[in-house]
Image: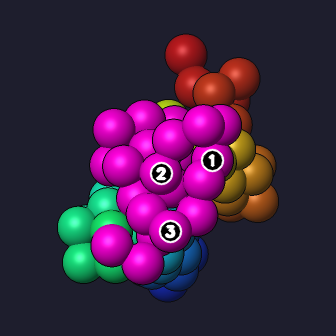
Amino acid sequence: MKEGKSRAYWRKNLTYLSVLLTIWFLVSYVCSIIFVEPLNQIQFAGFKLGFWLAQQGSIYVFVALIFIYVFLMNRLDGEYHLDEEDHP
């Protein structure tokens, strides 16, 4: 891959990582720790939402973000013609 395309590829990859890690931080830290009291006023599946996010929700979000990252990277690899089929 040429130098310019390589830089563009990694810039886009780092953008994906930054956005997804920011979402993870917001859900796991901000919602589960900082805003836990206001969120506990809301019931979700019989539990206080702040408690549920801290115990289960942040894990579900993390796993979903992994699948989203895989989807985005597969699409990016295809865009830059770096599909797995192209490599021995």
Q: Earlier in the sequence, mark 3 or mark 2?
A: 3
Residue beneath the point at 58% across and 64% down:
42
Q: Are marks 2 and 1 in contact (CB under 8 Å)?
A: yes
Q: Is mark 2 on a helix, strand or loop?
A: strand
The picture places residue 2, in percent across and down from the top left corner, at 50, 70
Residue 71 picture quarter: top right
SS assignment for the magenta stretch, majority:
helix
The picture places residue 65, in percent across and down from the top left corner, at 53, 48
User: In this orientation, which residue lies closer to the viewer: 49 or 31?
Assistant: 49
Tell me the residue that label 2 is attached to: 48
Tell me the residue that label 1 is attached to: 44
Q: Pick out the residue farthest to the top.
A: 88
Under mark 1, the amino acid is Phe
- Rendered image: mark on residue 2: none
Q: Residues within 10 Å of mark 2 (few under 14, many from 20)?
A: some
Q: Are marks 3 and 2 in contact (CB under 8 Å)?
A: yes
Q: Does the magenta portion include 87?
A: no
Q: How crowded is mark 1: few (under 14 residues within 10 Å), some or many (20 or more)?
A: some
Residue beneath the point at 55% across and 16% down:
88
Highlighted magenta segment, given as a residue range: 37-61
Tell me the residue that label 3 is attached to: 41
Whether residue 69 is visible to the viewer of this picture, yes or no, is no
The picture places residue 31, in percent across and down from the top left corner, at 38, 70
Q: Is mark 1 on a helix, strand or loop?
A: strand
Residue beneath the point at 44% across and 44% down:
52
Please, is residue 87 above or below residue 78 in the view? Answer: above
How far is disc 2 from disc 1 in space, using C-alphas? 6 Å
Under mark 2, the amino acid is Lys
